[in-house]
Amino acid sequence: MIGRRAFVGGLAATVGGCAASPPSPPAEASTVVDLTHPLGPSSPYIQVRDATFPFRRAPIATIATRGVYANKWELTEHIGTHIDAPCHFAEDAPCLEAIPLDDLFAEAVVIDLRARVEANPDTELTLADLERWQKAHGPLPQRSVVLMCSGWDARWPSQERFANPDAGGVMHFPGFSRAAIEHLAARPEILGIGVDTFSIDPGRDTRYEGHRVLSAAKKWALECLANLSRLPPSGSRLFIGVPKVEGASGGPARVVAWVPHDRGPH
């Protein structure tokens, strides 16, 4: 596993600095994959009466009127591609600004459930799925994030298709089983877990049981990820760029993966 210093060095080489010449590629040739949906007024969100609402954007200045363009935003913390801080469901757990910087760099473990999800949107990532991954790829890496690739990101930005409610309003989309989350929450090598759906819990779970387990273990979650199908089962690395907001239970995130060229996608 590459260290954070080398990882940051690769990042610096990739994005460049103030040099006039083009930046040099990272020492370890890799492809950069954006795992983030654009956030805007049409972004899907979990609809909770008298609580949540769409992302709102309004201008406070324009080039024509003030010579500068700027907007104000109104949003909830858990909209678009975002991170759940541990304090989201645990009072004594760290909020967003207290997550250590080192914990925002992670080795990616990707478990592909797309075939099952096509047949059953209520599919869960189970202990058996974790065991199959480890049998094929070895032990879970140190400082890793386990990601569920369900293909659900293809439904973005349709609110109806992403929420997938039934006639009674119950949402149906895949997530982690409680047993799988309990197992991962107890593993010291795991920093967090992530999904390409609204929630790490399956859509029909209205009590967010898995969230409570993960938060109690002081681990974070990533939700509404994109492009997980472009990552291999192992070997890629993530950086989660999050706003450092005091007391935040989460926030929109720019999640970026580096995939070594000797690793293919699923």
Image (cartoon, rainbow, N blue to C red):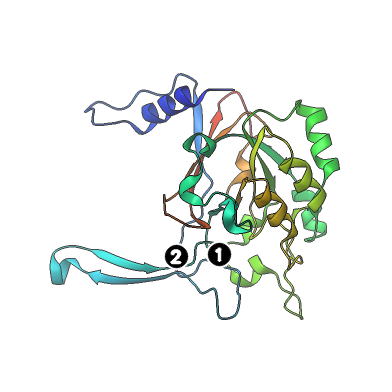
Between 78 and 11, the one lying in front of the other is: 78
Look at discs 1 and 2 and give the one toward the viewer. Answer: 2
Q: In this figure, what is the number of numbered marks?
A: 2
Q: Are marks 1 and 2 in contact (CB under 8 Å)?
A: yes
User: Left or right of 183: which side holds 87?
Assistant: left
Give residue 157's mark: 1
Which residue in the rendered view is the most extreme toward the top? 27
Residue 225: in sight, yes or no? Answer: no
Residue in the image at 78% along x and 42% along y: 183
User: Left or right of 108: which side holds 14?
Assistant: left
Q: Quadrant of the N terminus?
A: top right
**Residue flagged by tag 1: what amino acid is it?**
Pro
Residue 127 on image: x %, y %:
83, 43
Q: Quadrant of the C terminus?
A: top right
**Residue flagged by tag 2: what amino acid is it?**
Gly
Picture layout, residue 38 above or below residue 260: below
Residue 52 on image: x %, y %:
54, 73
- Pointer 1 or 2: first along the chain: 2
Give residue 40's mark: 2
Residue in the image at 29% along x and 66% along y: 71
